[in-house]
Amino acid sequence: MTIKAVIFDIGNVLIEWQPERHYDRWIGEERRKQMFEAVDLHAMNDRIDSGENWRDVIYETADQYPEWREEIIGWHQNWIALASPVIGHSVHLLRALRTKDIPVFTLTNFGIESFDYAETIYAFLSEFDRRYISGHMKVIKPDPRIYEMVEQDCKIEPSSLLFADDRVDNVKAAEARGWNAHLFESPQGWADCLIANGLLTKEEAAF
């Protein structure tokens, strides 16, 4: 089946998302481990990605853990340091596909306000043909419903979609819907996948 649209995740596909790394630099690895053990920050972030207010959720969590208040607030105040740097080769692949008039979408677990902010920093986030942002959809990957919502909106049969994500559970959920899915481990691996599917040449995919 011909691929009719390519779908990119954002975190760890187009932009590195490594909160632990940021906190290691800020407060040291040992203290970071204590903090992440005491506070489920990823669950906090899932609430944001599900559509709750970015600032409100973080400050509410900070109030619940006064011993970590400053560090938790840093998840909001220093957020761009958590979501960086850009994975340049992946952005190149996004633009190479669009140059060939291949529809390119994003399906990402991302908060409403945090995505709006990220778009002011990373211009390429405005370059997708369609954007499926979990915060607006009120459901996060790997819930099957989010993939179904994409299908219903774009009206492309699942077997004609090619999706890249860095998480195994998200990839398996897409495959369960009948999508073609690639586990993103490096931009070169993703480039090779696009080449293998006849979407880009080696020259077009090179960075």
Image: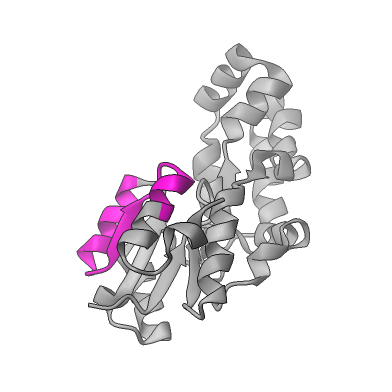
User: Where residue 43 sits in the image (x, y, percent)?
Assistant: 49, 43
Q: Name the residue at the bottom extreme.
A: 155
Q: Which residues are magenta?
A: 168-191
Residue 179 within the segment the image draws in magenta? yes
User: Where residue 102 sits in the image (x, y, percent)?
Assistant: 47, 77
Residue 150 in view (yes/no): yes
Residue 63 in view (yes/no): no
User: Where residue 147 sits in the image (x, y, percent)?
Assistant: 35, 70
Residue 49 lies in quadrant? bottom right
- 148, above or below 46, in the image: below
Q: Name the residue at the front extreme.
A: 203
- 101, above or below 18, in the image: below
Residue 115 within the segment the image draws in magenta? no
- Residue depicted at 43% across the width and 54% down the height: 191
- Residue depicted at 33% across the width and 55% down the height: 182
Task: State which quarter of the image contains the N terminus.
Answer: bottom left
Q: Nearer the viewer, residue 15 or 36?
A: 15
Q: Nearer the viewer, residue 123 or 71?
A: 123
User: Where residue 7 sits in the image (x, y, percent)?
Assistant: 44, 67
Residue 91 lies in quadrant? bottom right
On screen, residue 191 versus residue 145, left or right, reads right
Residue 146 lies in quadrant? bottom left
